[in-house]
Amino acid sequence: MSFLEYAPAPESTAILHLRDEYGLFIDGAWTEGRGATFPTISPATEKRIATISSADATDVDRAVAAARRAYEKTWSRMPGGDRGKYLFRIARLLQERAREFAVAESLDNGKPIKESRDVDIPLVAAWFFYYAGWADKLDYAGLGAAPRALGVAAQVIPWNFPLLMLAWKIAPALAAGNTVVLKPAETTPLTALLFAEVVQQADLPPGVVNILTGAGDTGQALVEHPGVDKVAFTGSTAVGRQIARAVAGTGKKVTLELGGKAANIVFDDAPIDEAVEGIVDGIFFNQGHVCCAGSRLLVQENVHDEVVERLKTRMATLRLGDPLDKNTDIGAINSAEQLERIRALSAAGEEEGAERWSAPCVIPDTGFWFAPTIFDNVSTSSRIAREEIFGPVLSILTFRTPGEAIAKANNTPYGLSAGIWSDKGAKILAVADRLRAGVVWANAFNRFDPASPFGGYKESGYGREGGRHGLGAYLTTGPSKGGA
Ligand code: TAP
């Protein structure tokens, strides 16, 4: 052990009181799923955490029917101020149980506890507080006269920010007066199931929130169910396309939050050390399992060598290992399948001639791990410059002029986010204005706020979540289809 080595500092799991088996949460009660059960495992140890139910088409029917009853009988008729009180209660309960949720999230997802503790769970509570405040002010949201809820929302979310994606979906839907049926990802159902306990604690009327676990076919049965009025999906572009096809012509309102391949642009006048921190935050936060990750570094040619050298020095200090250790920077890859995909795309990068360098991490014997990796001299046509890797892998490209940086940044089928690093405010504004990306960060990366809309262009999907825009995705001023 060297002089500056950190001693292990694992967060205790004693605070977690998990059940051995979880059912589905329908109409305010736990019930067994009719599909085959499956285990949820820790990606860091490959050990089983709990056995999870799988919802089949009949379970989906029951959940949608419960959500419809709750919508028509209680939730849509309740004054907005009262809905807001429930949401404030949920937000406070999440804050009270924050440590427990952080431990559960890191255990099930593999993300470092310092991220689930300091980023995910505080943002989850912030999302509920924010939308709780809107519940009695819908008429003043600037979304048209007397906006009304849509009805029953089918919500399907991915595994990278399990509870945060749940909050992005459920908080605005409930504030607007909708009821929901939500399906978490197969590999990360745990915090959604704990959230169902919070729903019970908050005494929410039965059927307002229903949680169905299962795999992709459960998600498909849910979004295709004729009883739902709104589909909100976050996940891959491939599945997003299937969903868009499935709901076309049905009259269901849809929002799709899909993949990304963001450019993080570093100009030669940028504060280099700050930019290096931003690059690390942009691609290695949450093992790069981030839709808006800064996975393409565009660095001005005359500072390329300096930036890459300092980046390698910084990356060599990243600690990879036990997600529950408070000193861990890089946790586990969420699943064996995702690890395989990262490996395959990285191999393609090498075959295409890019220079690979990985941080010198000790990889644990069990679990799914991938050392933070950069590829230099990447060409714009290379697969690792075009495809979403969704892992801790950065592709480095260079540019000479702002015009070239903009052209390269926009040369992608995606358009979710981008970053700009420069000392010159006017340059930042001029470049940001020409980037086809839903979110552009200036001298920062991966910052989120419930008041700020988030969403993409092109193959990154359509619709916005967050802020007033996110509320609009759950409201209509069209004719009523039932409820109040
Ligand atoms: P997907 O494979 O698309 O899965 C997303 C969710 O959809 C999961 O719950 C999945 O269930 C379910 N699903 C699978 N097939 C379905 C179908 N035919 N119909 C309905 N639902 C279906 O994505 P992923 O691998 O979990 O997540 C990674 C992707 O999400 C990345 O591309 C990432 O960029 C994107 N993402 C985007 C955002 C935003 S805000 N734009 C945020 C986070 C992640 P199973 O898990 O059981 O397969």
Image: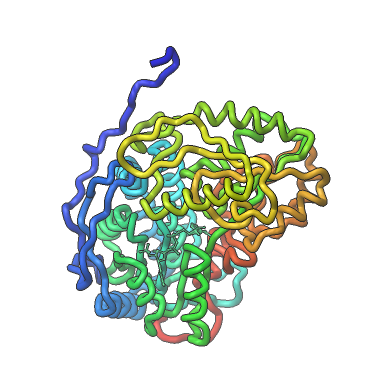
Q: Quadrant of residue 434?
A: bottom right
> Relative to residue 225, is residue 281 drawn left or right?
right
Residue 255, position as x, y percentages in the image = 52, 70
Camera-side residue of 264 and 131: 264
Can residue 140 be seen from the camera position used here?
A: no
Residue at the spot x=53%, y=66% of the render?
Answer: 237
Quarter holding the N terminus is: top left
Q: How many marks?
A: 0
Say which of 402 and 452 sits in front. 402
Q: Which residue is drawn at 82% across and 51% down?
A: 403
Q: Name the residue rendered at 81%, 45% in the picture.
A: 427
State the image coordinates of residue 319 (x, y, percent, origin top left): 44, 30
Q: How is the image coloured?
A: rainbow
Q: Is residue 470 above or below residue 42?
A: below
Residue 40 image point, x, y percent: 27, 54
Between 4 and 201, the residue placed more toward the observer is 4
The answer to whether residue 458 is seen in the rendering is: yes
Say whether residue 362 is left or right of residue 441.
left
Q: Which residue occupies the foreground of this view, 323 or 351?
A: 351
Image location (x, y in percent) of residue 74: 33, 75
Q: Which residue shows up at 31% across the image and 30% down it? A: 10
> Height in image: 116 above or below 476?
above
Rendering quadrant holding ligand 1: bottom left
Q: Quadrant of the C terminus?
A: bottom left
